[in-house]
Image: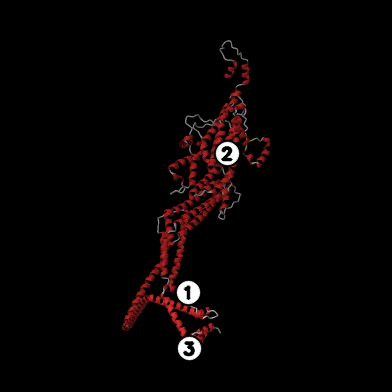
């Protein structure tokens, strides 16, 4: 066994039996080769080195830095740790050095520990004083408790049974008073249900809710009574009933808004803390109310349409129970005669709904400010209403689109179609004011039907104009000397537009559909204004025209305009076409092209009827170019024998359907007879009517420019520069034929050839050809 293991066993034995006996230490001394005197001498040397080291702070810090981490660990056995570090071969000098080093480290640590204890001695004394003071306080409390217990024992022995009975009676009296008060409160709580019903019947919702809330608080206080549990259940049922009545009142506000009544509802919702939920419920009520009201209206018109059909055809069976049909199914039962009226009344119903919503929104915006804790944030409040406006207007558009798409507009007359477009245009303006919506759904739904309708309408009007021209007598139509297009009933919408613009300068809010106090539907007012315009006298129209169109007015004292009956028909068509442009701005330019075709066809027909036989040089190059262009784009060259082939061509080429044949008129009895001056009067009416049409188009140019896109203005200017400007050139070929036929140029030439031009003396009378010309 080596020395290191023996020392470890010795240390272990010293822990077990205490101090080592002298018999044990002798073998160690023998093994180390040291005597006891040498070991003590070595201890004295280590002590002197330790004192020198501990006295120097820098040396002390260096010693601390040399202490290994293993000695700091609480679970470390220092002896074993140091012995494990010994090498296998024991060196006495090494052992001495390690013992001296460990002694120095132990001394420094001990010295440092004593120093720190000395520094904390003051704090330790202070804490010890506190402990002593606490002990004194505990002793004082113990004395007080002991004295109290002694006094209680003395009182218990001194009180008599009578005194205890008096106290018990007083306690019982106090308890009975509390019970009596509680019973009265419970009795009042039981009668509260009747009072709440009375308040709800009076529509005093806020007071009813306040009473229920107070009752619930009281029931919570007295919940330890069994009877209060039943009353609490009844109060909860009453609260649910009150909330149902609040919901009913909220739905009534969607149909007809009353500011005072709605204020009571909002006070009740504020007490319940459900303002945000009330607005959500309000949006749902508006959506369901819109569905119900529109469905009832369509049911009424469907029943009316079916009753009209059954009265006209008694043998035809029609459905009578319309309550099972949906909205889109009911739209198919509406008769064409009732279609515009149904659309107008439906629009009025939807306007009333949006008006109520706008008033409710305005009420919330203008309501007095209350405690900020009782209202929801203004941002969330505004978002809910803006979202509700958008959703509500989407429902409005869907209802109108369903009604529009379920009906074939071919069954409508032109006036009915214009009324329908007026209604849709009014709805579009309403959408802009209600929620800044462009109403693209409405615009698109009416656009395609209007295009299809207008194509057939324009084709029919060209054919109608063809018939008018073939049957025209070309007699002057009697009109006033200051007559212009703005006096025709078809142009009344332009007069109304000018008046509205003039009025808007003075009163910008005149066209507000949601102005405060609005009670008259814009669709009803439109119908009334249309009826008034329809019965207004021509003199009144003229006066209003002179007031609103001073720059367009024809001055008084000017010659009476020369025009034919067909000219008036064309002017009326101009009014309807411009009305289409006003209502259908998306296809305004296409309508303008069709309007130009009416003028082109009229000019071409007049030229072919009265100027075809004129000399070639009488037609200006510009007029010939215009006539050639019209003939290529508008005039059909089909002969009567090729009618079948033309129909087949039209079926495969839609562009051919826009062409119309030139009118065939037999006026040779008047235009070829010298006694009628070769139809000079007819020619005058025809030529001047074309000039009058061109002048009226010039008057309408500002209106046309306002209705078409700015990118198309150059094409309109080109039309006026190329087409309308040649109207005056039409006079030359028409009137030159009269001059050519009335004077027989060959006969006059022969007479002039027989004249003796070598005059020897002045004759007293004209030559024979001069007399012939003068005759």
User: In this orientation, does residue 332 appear?
Assistant: yes
Marks 3 and 2, the one that precedes in the sequence: 3
Secondary structure beneath disc 3? helix
Which label sits on residue 168? none
Which quadrant does the N terminus fall into? bottom right
Tell whether 218 sits left or right of 484.
left
Report crowding for label 1: few under 14, some 14 to 19, many 20 or more residues within 10 A (C-alpha): few
Residue 174 higher or lower than 610, as above or below: below
- Where does the image place residue 496, in percent across and percent down from the top left? 48, 40
Q: Which residue is mark 1?
A: 66
Report crowding for label 2: few under 14, some 14 to 19, many 20 or more residues within 10 A (C-alpha): few
Which label sits on residue 593? 2
Q: Which residue is mark 3?
A: 22
Marks 2 and 1, the one that precedes in the sequence: 1
Residue 133 higher or lower than 561, as above or below: below
- Where does the image place residue 259, in percent across and percent down from the top left? 42, 54
Label 2 with label 1: CB-CB less than 8 Å: no
Please state which of residues 733 and 33 is positioned toward the viewer in this rendering: 33
Taking the view exactly as shown, the residue that stands out farthest to the top is 760
Q: Residue at x 53, y 82 (%)?
A: 4
């Amino acid at each position: 066994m080596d020395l290191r293991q023996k020392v470890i066993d010795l240390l272990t034995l010293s822990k077990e039996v205490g101090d080592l006996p002298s018999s044990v230490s002798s073998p160690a001394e023998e093994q180390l080769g040291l005597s006891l005197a040498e070991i003590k001498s070595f201890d004295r040397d280590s002590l002197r080195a330790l004192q020198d080291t501990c006295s120097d702070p820098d040396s002390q810090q260096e010693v601390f830095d040399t202490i290994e981490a293993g000695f700091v660990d609480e679970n470390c056995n220092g002896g074993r740790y140091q012995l494990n570090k010994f090498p296998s071969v024991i060196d006495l000098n090494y052992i001495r050095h390690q013992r001296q080093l460990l002694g120095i480290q132990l001394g420094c640590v001990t010295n440092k520990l004593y120093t720190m204890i000395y520094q904390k001695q003051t704090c330790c004394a202070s804490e010890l004083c506190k402990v002593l003071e606490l002990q004194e306080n505990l002793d004082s409390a113990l004395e007080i408790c002991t004295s109290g217990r002694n006094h209680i024992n003395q009182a218990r022995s001194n009180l008599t049974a009578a005194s205890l009975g008096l106290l018990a009676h007083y306690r019982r009296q106090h308890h009975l008073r509390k019970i009596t008060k509680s019973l009265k409160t419970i009795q009042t709580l039981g009668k509260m249900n009747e009072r709440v019903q009375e308040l709800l019947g009076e529509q005093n919702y806020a007071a009813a809710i306040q009473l229920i809330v107070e009752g619930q608080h009281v029931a919570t206080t007295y919940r330890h009574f069994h009877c209060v549990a039943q009353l609490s259940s009844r109060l909860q049922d009453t609260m649910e009933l009150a909330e149902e009545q609040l919901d009913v009142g909220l739905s009534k506000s969607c149909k007809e808004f009353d500011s005072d009544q709605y204020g009571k509802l909002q006070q009740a919702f504020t007490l319940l803390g459900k303002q945000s939920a009330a607005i959500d419920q309000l949006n749902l009520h508006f959506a369901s109310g819109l569905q119900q009201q529109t469905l009832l209206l369509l049911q009424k018109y469907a029943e009316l349409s079916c009753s009209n059909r059954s009265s006209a055809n008694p043998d035809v069976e029609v459905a009578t129970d319309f309550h099972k049909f949906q909205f889109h199914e009911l739209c198919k039962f509406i008769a064409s005669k009732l279609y515009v009226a149904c659309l107008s009344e439906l629009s009025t119903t939807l306007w009333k709904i949006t008006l109520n919503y706008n008033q409710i929104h305005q009420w919330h915006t203008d309501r007095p400010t209350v405690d900020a804790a009782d209202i929801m944030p203004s941002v969330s409040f505004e978002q809910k209403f803006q979202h509700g406006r958008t959703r509500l207007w989407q429902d409005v558009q869907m209802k109108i689109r369903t009604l529009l798409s379920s009906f074939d507009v071919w069954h409508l007359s032109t006036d009915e179609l214009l009324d329908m477009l007026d209604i849709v245009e009014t709805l579009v303006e309403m959408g802009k004011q209600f929620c800044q919506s462009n109403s693209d759904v409405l615009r698109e739904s009416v656009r395609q039907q209007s295009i299809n309708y207008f194509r057939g309408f324009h084709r029919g009007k060209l054919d109608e104009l063809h018939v008018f021209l073939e049957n025209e007598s070309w007699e002057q139509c009697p009109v006033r000397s200051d007559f212009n297009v703005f006096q025709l009933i078809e142009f009344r919408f332009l007069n109304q537009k000018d008046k509205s613009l003039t009025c808007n300068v003075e009163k910008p809010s005149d066209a507000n559909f949601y102005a405060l106090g609005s009670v008259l539907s814009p669709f009803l007012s439109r119908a009334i204004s249309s009826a008034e315009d329809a019965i207004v006298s021509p003199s009144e129209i003229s006066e209003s025209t002179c007031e609103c169109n001073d720059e367009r007015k024809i001055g008084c004292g000017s010659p009476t305009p020369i025009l034919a009956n067909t000219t008036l028909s064309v002017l009326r068509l101009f009014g309807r076409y411009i009305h289409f442009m006003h209502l259908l701005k998306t296809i305004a330019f296409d309508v303008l092209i069709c309007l130009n075709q009416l003028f082109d066809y009229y000019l071409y027909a007049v030229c072919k009827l009265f100027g075809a036989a004129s000399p070639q040089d009488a037609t200006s190059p510009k007029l010939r170019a215009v006539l050639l262009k019209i003939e290529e784009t508008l005039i059909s060259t089909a002969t009567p024998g090729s009618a079948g082939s033309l129909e087949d061509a039209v079926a495969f080429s839609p562009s051919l359907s826009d062409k119309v044949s030139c009118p065939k008129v037999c006026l040779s009895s008047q235009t070829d007879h010298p006694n009628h001056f070769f139809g000079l009067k007819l020619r005058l009416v025809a030529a001047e009517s074309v000039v009058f049409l061109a002048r009226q188009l010039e008057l309408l140019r500002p209106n046309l420019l306002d209705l078409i896109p700015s990118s198309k203005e150059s094409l309109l200017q080109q039309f006026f520069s190329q087409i309308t400007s040649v109207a005056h050139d039409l006079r030359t070929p028409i009137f030159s034929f009269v001059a050519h036929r009335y004077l027989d140029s060959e006969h006059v030439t022969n007479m002039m050839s027989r004249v003796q031009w070598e005059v020897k003396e002045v004759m007293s009378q004209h030559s024979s050809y001069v007399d012939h010309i003068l005759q």
